[in-house]
């Protein structure tokens, strides 16, 4: 299998599995409930994950439920893999242009 075929298969797999642009943000905060551990222990805070994305110059965030954390992290990782692959292909094309290759 040549390099181009491997890349094509990798890209196809990435796209079929789901993909999303953004970053995972871990939020830590106190809930404010009187009897909660976070109110009694100054070092303890609740954690939750959010997907952060900048679109049309504005940042937006969406909460990621625990049951979706693995799936969304995979989508984000695949986006970064795809982005890296595109950058690599672009660099190869740039080199071809410089060398006037077909």
Image (tube, rainbow, N blue to C red):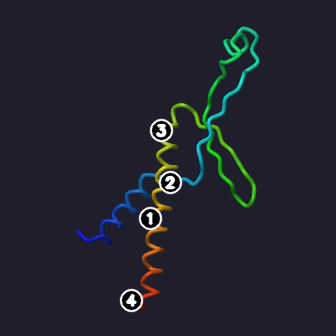
Query: Which label is found at residue 85?
Result: 1
Front-most of residues 9 and 89: 89
Q: Earlier in the sequence, mark 4 or mark 3?
A: 3
Whole-Å distance between the Cαs marked 1 and 4? 21 Å
Q: Distance between the residues labelled 2 and 1?
A: 14 Å
Q: Position of residue 11 (x, y in %)?
A: 40, 62
Left or right? Give the position of 92 relative to 9.
Answer: right
- Name the residue at 46% across, 60% down: 82
Calculate the distance from the C-alpha at mark 1 to the C-alpha at mark 3: 22 Å
Q: Which of the two residues, 53 or 15, is positioned nearer the viewer here?
A: 53
Q: Mark 4 points at which residue?
A: 101
Which residue bears the numbered disc 2? 19
The span from disc 2 to disc 4 (Cα, nearest Å) is 33 Å
**Residue indicated by mark 3:** 70
Q: Residue furthest left?
A: 1
- Mark 1 or mark 3: whose residue is earlier in sequence: 3
């Amino acid at each position: 299998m040549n390099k181009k075929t491997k890349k094509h298969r990798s890209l196809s797999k990435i796209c079929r599995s789901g993909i999303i642009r953004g970053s995972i943000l871990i939020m830590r905060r106190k809930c404010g409930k009187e009897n909660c551990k976070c109110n009694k222990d100054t070092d303890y805070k609740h954690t939750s994950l959010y997907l952060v994305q900048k679109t049309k110059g504005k940042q937006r965030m969406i909460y990621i439920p625990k049951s979706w954390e693995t799936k969304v992290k995979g989508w984000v990782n695949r986006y970064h893999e795809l982005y890296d692959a595109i950058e690599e292909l672009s660099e190869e094309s740039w080199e071809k242009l410089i060398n006037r290759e077909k």
